[in-house]
Image (cartoon, coloured by chain):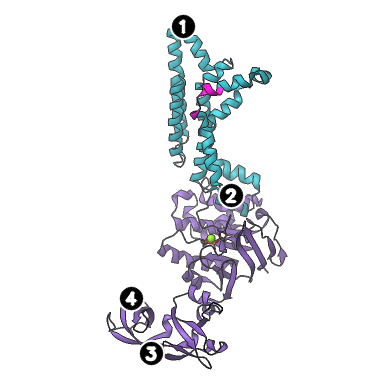
Chain colours: A cyan, B purple
Amino acid sequence: MRLPKARALIEFVTVLPYMIPAIALVAGIFVIKPHARWFLNSDFSLIPFYVVLSLPFTYRSIDAGLRAIDLRTLVDASRSLGAGWLYTLRTVIVPNLRTSIISASFLTAAVVVGEFTIADTLLKETLPRFQATFTAREPQAGYLLNLLALLTTTLLFILLSVLTRKRDSSRRSFAAALLAAEKHQETAS
Amino acid sequence: MTTLDFISVRKTFGSNVALEGFDLDVREGELISLLGPSGCGKTTALRIAAGFEFADSGAVLVAGSDITRTPAHKRNMGMVFQSYSLFPNLTVANNVEFGLRTRDVEKGARHRRVAEMLDLVQLTPFADRYPHQLSGGQQQRVALARALAVQPQVLLLDEPLSALDAKVRTALRDEIRRIQTEVGITTLFVTHDQEEALAISDRICVMSSGRLEQLGTPTEVYRQPTTAFVARFVGLMNELPADVGAAGEVSVLGHRIDVPSARALAHGTSAHVLVRPEDMVLNGDGLAGSVTSVTFQGAGTLVGVRLDVLDRLVSIDMARGEADGVSVGDRVTVGIDGSKAVIEPVERPAA
Ligand SMILES: Nc1ncnc2c1ncn2[C@@H]1O[C@H](COP(=O)(O)OP(=O)(O)OP(=O)(O)O)[C@@H](O)[C@H]1O
Ligand SMILES: [Mg+2]
């Protein structure tokens, strides 16, 4: 908000995961694999990768939310009315970024549900990976499952747009993020 | 007694000096305007009073006690911002109630106070609306009610009218003044609009590049500017080249006038003389020229004259009726009343 140079850098960093194909990321995993086996074998090893992958969506949707309201003035107003930092966070910042936070979480969920490459490499049984193996074994039921997954994601998005409809401000950014997410889904499947 | 004092406050942002040796004493119940061009440090002074910024050196006192290092939420200041600052997720009533909640005022008293405040700004019917359902002027009135609800020691307003259109601006300006006098609150009002400052202030603090230029009543600042900067910044000024003679006599383009303020200057000094449009008379004894514009302004008429000797335009303010029959192209003479003129020696590069 206050540092325009930092903003440019962050924007660049957050789109990196989409400029670099997931497979490159995976190649990186193999390089570090011998050193971090204990970590990669744990069930939590997917978390850092998913954090990186969902960063563009969370960043963009929260950043757009911040731009739509003049948060700095709202925070100043709250403080001059006697509110401390925590109270300001709870009563001013979070409620006014609610739509952004909701859409960020939904988009992250969508990204994670559709992610195949990394999970496959790390041998983690996530939904897309299950879909792939299942389709290979039982093609017809597999396609049905894929269809169901697609429908679920679509429903998620509809739910999301209903939830965020009250406030116009973050909708534009949301639409942009949605497009990006759909593109990601296409490349993943 | 709620007074607000700045004592020799200095504030820098990196290498940029925003305030330097800034002294100001706002008296109990007084409205002082901070007036100055963009970037002169008005907002900075206000934010230091509010506790959003801290002075590098110097002190800020409220009612005599030092609050220089007190964080914003522990001060008792009411602030109205330039941009709309209502909480978008709260209704008008809840916005006004906000500061009462942080102070743990009990519910009954809270509701009474909110009702009282909405009544004060005449927005009672709008209590349940959300900020985006209000006009800009209404939003600023709610912001004012919200700031006043907590009975702050000092009211701070940072160009609260600048986002509004002209008509709403004058109406709200007068309303702010009415409410301020009614509540009797000590107030600091930032503006870069000299007309606004002249209209509502008890005193005006004219600032330039982080310093106080002049502090005085609107009449003093307008009629007796102490520096050429103030003279130029507040109101219209005609500026003419002059040579200082003996005993306050000044020669303006060969025409002799009496300028009392020139007595302090040495004989032979080159100077600029600054004269208000209302201190010029048409067809008096003076400089020849021709009328280039006649602008009707309601209460008076502003006549523009291009002088023959010096290719320069001067403006003359004439009372209603006086300018009847004057039209563009007329040959006229312009007389100068130097009794209130400001004289500024021309700085010459040292020989
Ligand atoms: N947060 C900041 N960081 C860096 N410089 C700042 C900051 N705030 C103000 N300044 C600088 O301090 C000086 C005074 O700024 P200030 O905002 O007080 O001016 P102002 O009189 O309120 O002007 P305006 O009429 O445009 O609002 C300016 O030169 C400005 O660039
Ligand atoms: Mg300002």
Q: Chain of mark 3?
A: B
| Between marks 2 and 3 in the image, the one whose residue lies nearer the viewer | 3
Disc 2 and disc 1 on one polypeptide chain: yes
Q: Secondary structure at mark 3?
A: strand
**In the displayed structure, does residue B313 sit left or right of residue B192?**
left
Task: Find the magenta span and give its range.
Answer: A18-25
**Would you name the residue on which mark 2 appears?**
A75
Mark number for residue A170?
Answer: none
Q: Chain of mark 2?
A: A
Mark number for residue B295?
Answer: 4
Residue B173 falls inside the magenta stretch: no
Amino acid on which the number 1 mark rests in the picture: Glu
Mark number for residue A138?
Answer: 1
Q: Secondary structure at mark 2?
A: helix
Amino acid on which the number 3 mark rests in the picture: Gly
Mark number for residue B286?
Answer: 3
Report how far apart the C-alphas of labels 2 and 1 lie in the structure: 57 Å
The answer to which image quadrant residue B30 occupies is bottom right
Q: Secondary structure at mark 1?
A: loop
Q: Mark 4 Cα within 10 Å, few/some/many (few <14, many 20+)? A: few
Q: Pointer 1 and pointer 4: residues touching (CB < 8 Å)?
A: no
Report how far apart the C-alphas of labels 1 and 4 lie in the structure: 89 Å
- At which x and y percent is residue A179? 43, 31
Q: Upstream in the sequence, badge 2 or badge 1?
A: 2
Report how far apart the C-alphas of labels 1 and 3 lie in the structure: 106 Å
Report how far apart the C-alphas of labels 2 and 3 lie in the structure: 60 Å
Amino acid on which the number 4 mark rests in the picture: Thr
| Between marks 4 and 3 in the image, the one whose residue lies nearer the viewer | 3
Q: Residue at the location (61% across, 53% down)?
A: B99
- At which x and y percent is residue A55? 54, 32
